Structures are given as structure tokens and as C-alpha cells.
Image (cartoon, rainbow, N blue to C red):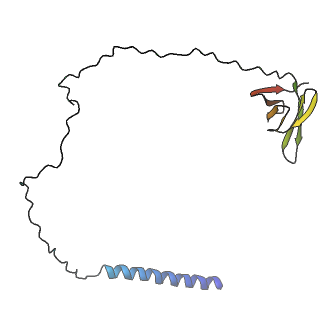
Amino acid sequence: MNKKRTNLLLGIAVIIIWGGAGYRVLSALGDQEELPVAAPSMVKSPADDFAAVTDTVQLRANYRDPFGLTPVAMKTDTQTYMKTIRGTTPVPHAQADMGFVKYAGYIANPVSKRTLSMLLINGKTMMLNEGESAEGIKVLKNMRDSVKVAYRGRVRFIVKSS
């Protein structure tokens, strides 16, 4: 019963809204006389096109001929210039011996989803997360079968030792 009443009220509302819209359209299309429009009151005088107008600009003709009728004088350079180049040799990087570092394995934490890398540095076992460093060795990435470490600016992969 409640649904019928709601449908009836909505139907009446639709009829009222469409009726109002139709009334406005039909009243706008009705035969109404147009309002008179006032004519412009100012009359323009014809422009005097033949009057002499004084120039206020002076032209500067200090540019080259755009059509190339006059040849351009070429200046010859009698001096030769040589660049001096210093003979520098690149400094070789000091080789960092990474033989004292061995990768022993990893420990995975199931709660925090992080892995600890176990490294043997000078005979000591160090457990490091990614980004941590000990004794100048910084762990960059743990890839479970190998670890990426940086030592004195040199990046290297160390494979798991058996």
C-alpha cells in the first residue's frame, strides 16, 4: 500500500513539473509584439583620408642589405688560435680487497617480512639489515643467494659460501 502511495505522489510531481515547463515554453512562443529599439543618436563625420600626417618615427638604416645586392666585406683572420690541452691522466681507483668478507646466509623474519644477512667480516659474524653497515661494509641488497655490499665506494656482489 505504501509503494502505491509513493508512486502516485511521484507521478503527480512529474505531471506538475512537466506542466510548468510546458507552460513556460508555450508562453515564450506566444504572439507578442517586439519592443521598439532606439536608433543611434550620434552621426559620425566622414574621415579625412587625404590629410597630411606628420611622421613621428625616424628609421634607422644601419642593417645589412636583405636582398644581397651589395657584397659583404669579409674580414680575414690572420692569427691562428690553438687551444692548449693539459695532459692529465686519470687517477686509478684504489682496489678494495673484499676477501675478508664472506656471506654466510640469511634469516627471514615472517612477522616483519625482513631478512637479516649474516656476514663473516674478519672472522666475526655480523647480522645486518639492508642499509646497515659494520666495519665499513654496507649491505645494499639481500638477494638470498647473494648479497650486494659497498666497501670504500666500491659495490660488489658476494655469493653465499658453502
In the image, taking residue 77 as reference, residue 33 lies left or right, namely left
Inspect this view and state whether residue 142 appears: no
In this rendering, is residue 47 above or below 141? below
Where is residue 91? Give x, y as percent: 67, 18
> For the point 11% across and 70% down, which residue is it?
43
Quarter where residue 26 is shown: bottom left
Q: Quadrant of the C terminus?
A: top right
In the image, taking residue 51 as reference, residue 115 lies left or right, namely right
In the image, taking residue 84 as reference, residue 150 lies left or right, namely right
Where is residue 45? Give x, y as percent: 9, 66
Q: Nearer the viewer, residue 32 or 8?
A: 32
Q: Nearer the viewer, residue 20 or 118?
A: 118
How many dots with numbers? 0
Where is residue 104? Give x, y as percent: 90, 29
> For the point 60% across and 86% down, which residue is it?
5
Q: Residue furthest front?
A: 79
> For the point 28% across and 19% down, which residue is it?
75
